[in-house]
Amino acid sequence: MERQELAVALSIHVRTLDRWHLERRGPPRITIGRRILYREAAVNEWLQANEEAGTVHRR
């Protein structure tokens, strides 16, 4: 899925995904050329792991 699509799904700004990537706390992503993509399975695993750890914060 594209960055914008994930940002909408998580109700966050695309820049938040970028910041999380720099802080190494966001979902794993794949870069193909200039496109940044997220595998849905990897996002779901990341969400589940953070839900169990209680570290996902929603505004």
Image (tube, rainbow, N blue to C red):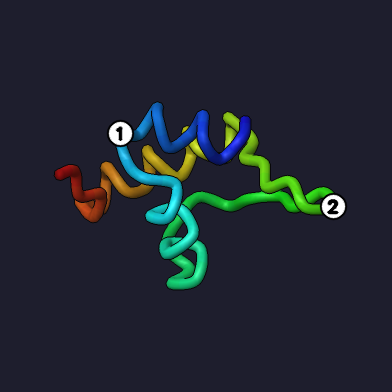
Nearest the viewer among 51 and 1 is 1
Q: Residues within 10 Å of mark 2 (few under 14, many from 20)?
A: few
Q: Position of residue 3 (x, y in %)?
A: 55, 40
Q: Position of residue 25 (x, y in %)?
A: 42, 63
On screen, residue 7 versus residue 59, left or right, reads right
Q: Earlier in the sequence, mark 2 or mark 1?
A: 1
Tell me what residue is drawn at x 15 percent, y 44 percent.
59
**Residue at mark 1:** 11
Above or below, comparing residue 23 to residue 51 in the picture: below
Tell me what residue is drawn at x 45 percent, y 45 percent.
46
**Residue at mark 2:** 33
On screen, residue 30 versus residue 44, left or right, reads right
Outermost residue to the left:
59
Tell me what residue is drawn at x 36 percent, y 45 percent.
13
Q: Position of residue 16 (x, y in %)?
A: 38, 55
Q: CA distance from mark 2 to mark 1?
A: 26 Å
Disc 2 residue type (three-letter): Gly
Q: How many numbered badges does the structure rendering display?
A: 2
Q: Quadrant of the N terminus?
A: top right
Helix or strand or loop: what does disc 2 sit on? loop
State if disc 1 and disc 2 touch (CB < 8 Å): no
The label on residue 59 is none
Nearest the viewer among 5 and 54 is 5
Helix or strand or loop: what does disc 1 sit on? loop
